[in-house]
Image (tube, rainbow, N blue to C red):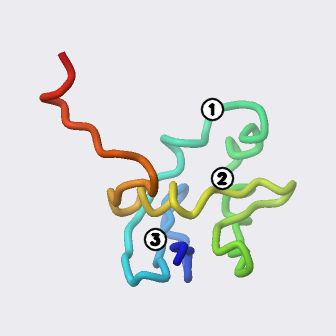
């Protein structure tokens, strides 16, 4: 079963608290992730635009005007530190 965003709560500025369908919760500071990226993320420099976020219940993720949305697996990873599906965790001791 794919994990989806169940609900979210806007906190201050670019912070959002997320709850996922598996019961996990976490917060993300989107300013460090999206602001200043350009392209489709250019509007995110305006915090008022960012705060127009909505939950796309069908896709189970956050979305913004203009069709911008983010993968729920990536949101869960950023919010909770959970592994991304299909991505093997790396062990820093293996890198030599």
Residue at 51% in and 55% down:
74
- Kind of element beneath mark 2: helix
- Residue positioned 50% across, 65% down in the render: 16
**Percent coordinates x, y for residue 1 in the rendering:** 52, 78
Question: Distance from label 2 to label 1 (Cα)?
Answer: 12 Å
Q: Which mark is residue 36?
A: 1
Residue 21: % across, % down: 49, 82
Q: Is residue 80 above or below residue 21?
A: above
Q: Which residue, given by chain and number where applicable, does mark 3 sit on? A: 17
- Quarter of the image for residue 83 reads bottom left
Q: Is residue 1 left or right of residue 64?
A: left
Tell me the crowding category of disc 1: few under 14, some 14 to 19, or many 20 or more residues within 10 angstroms, Cα based.
few
Going from the N terminus, do you reach mark 1 or mark 3 first?
3
Disc nearer the start of the sequence (2/1): 1
Residue receiving disc 2: 47
Q: Position of residue 63 (x, y in %)?
A: 72, 64
Contact (Cβ within 8 Å) of mark 2 with mark 1: no
User: Which quadrant of the figure has residue 42?
Assistant: top right
Q: Do tag 1 and tag 3 residues touch (Cβ < 8 Å)? A: no
Q: Residue at x 41, y 64 (%)?
A: 27
């Amino acid at each position: 079963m794919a994990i989806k965003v169940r609900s979210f709560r806007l906190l201050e500025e670019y912070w959002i608290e997320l709850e996922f369908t598996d019961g996990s919760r976490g917060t993300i500071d989107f300013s460090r992730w999206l602001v200043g990226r350009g392209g489709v993320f250019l509007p995110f420099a305006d915090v008022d635009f960012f705060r127009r976020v909505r939950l796309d219940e069908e896709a189970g993720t956050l979305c913004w005007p203009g069709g911008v949305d983010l993968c729920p697996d990536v949101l869960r990873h950023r919010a909770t530190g959970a592994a991304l599906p299909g991505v093997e965790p790396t062990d820093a001791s293996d890198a030599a």
